[in-house]
Amino acid sequence: MKRIIPSAAFALSLSLLPVGLPAQEIEESEEDGFSLMEEGARLILKGIMEEMEPAIEEFEGLAEELRPAFRELAVEMGPALIELLETVDSFSNYHPPEVMPNGDIILRRRDEAPEWVPPDGEEIDL
């Protein structure tokens, strides 16, 4: 008896399913589904943007405050950074920088990195 009830319920659920829907009705239901999904995604993104708006406005204000400091940094450090980028072939060939107790920063080359070639073929005295 216990096996008959689930089998009967399954058969009843199958008999309630629509059989032989015209292709046009299937396509229309798929289009409705996609448009509903698009609308749902649009609403989710709209909600996220509304939540993020205060943080974005705050970030814009912070960027305006920091603009003079970044400009000064570019003027003072720009030439040194350009020289560093011209000297270092690829940062993937180096270990992360080490800061020494006296404030010096050391970039150690990885053992598996290819041999370093000085820019313009000039030798550097250490």
Image (cartoon, rainbow, N blue to C red):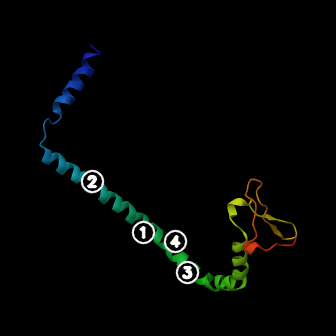
> Residue 31: x, y in percent?
22, 53
Above/below status of 118 relative to 110: below
Q: Quadrant of residue 17?
A: top left
> Residue 84: x, y in percent?
73, 74
- The answer for how far apart the CA atoms under marks 4 and 3 are is 10 Å
- The answer for how far apart the CA atoms under marks 2 and 1 are is 24 Å
The residue carrying mark 3 is 61
At a point 57% along the width and 83% down the height, the residue shown is 64
Between 9 and 103, the one lying in front of the other is 103
Q: Residue type at mark 4: give it.
A: Ala
- The answer for how far apart the CA atoms under marks 1 and 3 are is 18 Å
**Mark with earlier residue (1, 4):** 1
Q: Mark 3 or 2, which is nearer the eye? A: 2
**Mark with earlier residue (2, 4):** 2
Are there few (<14), some (14-19), or many (20+) residues within 10 Å of tag 3? few
- The answer for how far apart the CA atoms under marks 3 and 2 are is 40 Å
The residue carrying mark 4 is 55
> Residue 101: x, y in percent?
87, 66
Determine contact: label 3, label 2, CB under 8 Å.
no
Determine contact: label 4, label 3, CB under 8 Å.
no
Question: In which quadrant will I find the N terminus?
Answer: top left
- The answer for how far apart the CA atoms under marks 1 and 4 are is 10 Å
The residue carrying mark 1 is 50
At a point 35% along the width and 58% down the height, the residue shown is 41
**Mark with earlier residue (3, 2):** 2
Q: Residue type at mark 1: give it.
A: Glu
At a point 67% along the width and 82% down the height, the residue shown is 74
**Mark with earlier residue (4, 3):** 4
The residue carrying mark 2 is 34
Q: Mark 2 or 4, which is nearer the eye? A: 2
Q: Residue type at mark 2: give it.
A: Phe
- The answer for how far apart the CA atoms under marks 2 and 4 are is 32 Å
